[in-house]
Image (cartoon, grey):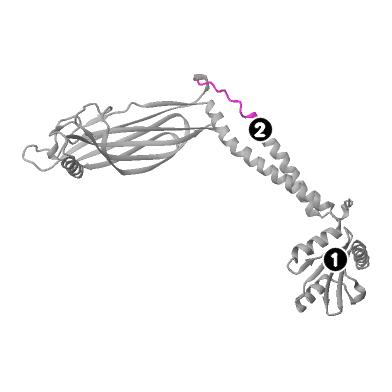
Amino acid sequence: MAKIKFDKVSLKKVFIACLLVIALVFQFAFLSYLFKSLAPNDKEDDSNVIMSYTSSGNYDYKVYLKPNEFINSEYLGPDEAYILNLIDHVHIDSLYNFSSTEKTNVSGINKTVAKLVIYYRESSDKSGNPEILKKENVIDEKVISFDDKTYNLIGNYDIYLDEYLKTLQEFQNQVKISVDGYVVVTSQTSFNGSVGGATYEDSYENTIKIPLSESVIKIENSQTKPKENKVYESDLLKTNKTVMGYIVIANIVVFIIICVLLRKLFMFTNKSEYDRVLGKILKNYDDVIVNTTSIIDISEYKLVEIEEFKEILNLSRELLLPIMNYEVMKGSETWLYIIKDNILYRYIISEGKLDYENKKKKTRRKKDNN
């Protein structure tokens, strides 16, 4: 085994080795911190609440009328009976409110969807009566983003009934059965939040239903009760598990990379100069070098010794001939040669030759310094 020559170890290699050691130290320290952090209280009671929050919402609406000789008002207010044929459109104001006990970062989507939903008329129980047609249209979509204790979102929409009534009538004429139709307007709010290192997600929705199958209708404004929820210390555990999963995987990958780099660095610094020089030549010029296992009888040729590799490389390119490679002595001497007619051009790589060249360089440097 070749001895390590510490005087030939470059500062760059020492620097890389130090960085690798530091990276390993940080990696193990960070993993230790992550494992220790997996100890929040997983009970969900009032003593472990990080934050409480409430989502609420409601609808206000006005029913605008077509010009007619019966009702003088431009519109009617909520919770009244309305003649369907006199309705021009329904103006809806929707409100969503979020409030919490702690400042929290929240992002999400508020989407308002208008759906034409048609049921069989045979059953008044809509929960047990399947929908036979549903056409959905997103009439508004807003991005929610805030970092506060409270947030309010207001939306304004006009729902024109003529197009829905036309679709309902066409469907009923086609299937030849009695059906009930509704325009269902739903405000859907879904969001993700974070507070004190814990994450949570939630949703809230409100619905208003406009009947389309009776002459006189009442709008069903199903006010959803405020939705209360809490974020507990156990949510820290969920958050850390997710985050730690990615970090542990990343650290394992980094650890493997570090081990590979250390192995390469160790192997590289244990190579002799002969191995390094020969390996570099064979790697960089493998397109013109041909390996051979048979030694030639040099007595049959006129021998020309080449002092530098670049000279035999240039000769190969000029003569359009490959460079033959034969390792005369394993790990200590290799011949690179070209044969042209009866001439053998030879470049030798050997430990003795490299040591001699290094001594010459050192002597030259000493003279230059003096």
Work out which quarter of the rendered image holds the C terminus and state it: bottom right
Q: Which mark is residue 319?
A: none
Q: Amino acid at mark 1?
A: Ser
The residue segment tinted magenta is 31-44
How far across and how far down the image is residue 284, in percent?
A: 75, 64
Q: Amino acid at mark 2?
A: Tyr
**Which residue is drawn at the image coordinates 24% and 42% (left, top)?**
158
Circle 1 sits in a helix, a strand or a loop, which is it?
A: loop
User: Residue 99, image x and y in percent?
Assistant: 41, 30
Q: Which residue is mark 1?
A: 294
Quick one: 318 or 354, which is closer to the camera? 318
Question: Horizontally, is 198 left or right of 168 in the view?
Answer: right
- Say which of marks 1 and 2 sits in front: 1
Question: What residue lies at 35% left-to-right and 43% top-to-bottom?
Answer: 141
Tell me the residue that label 2 is attached to: 33
Q: Is residue 247 left or right of residue 7?
A: left
* Residue located at (65% from left, 29% from top): 36
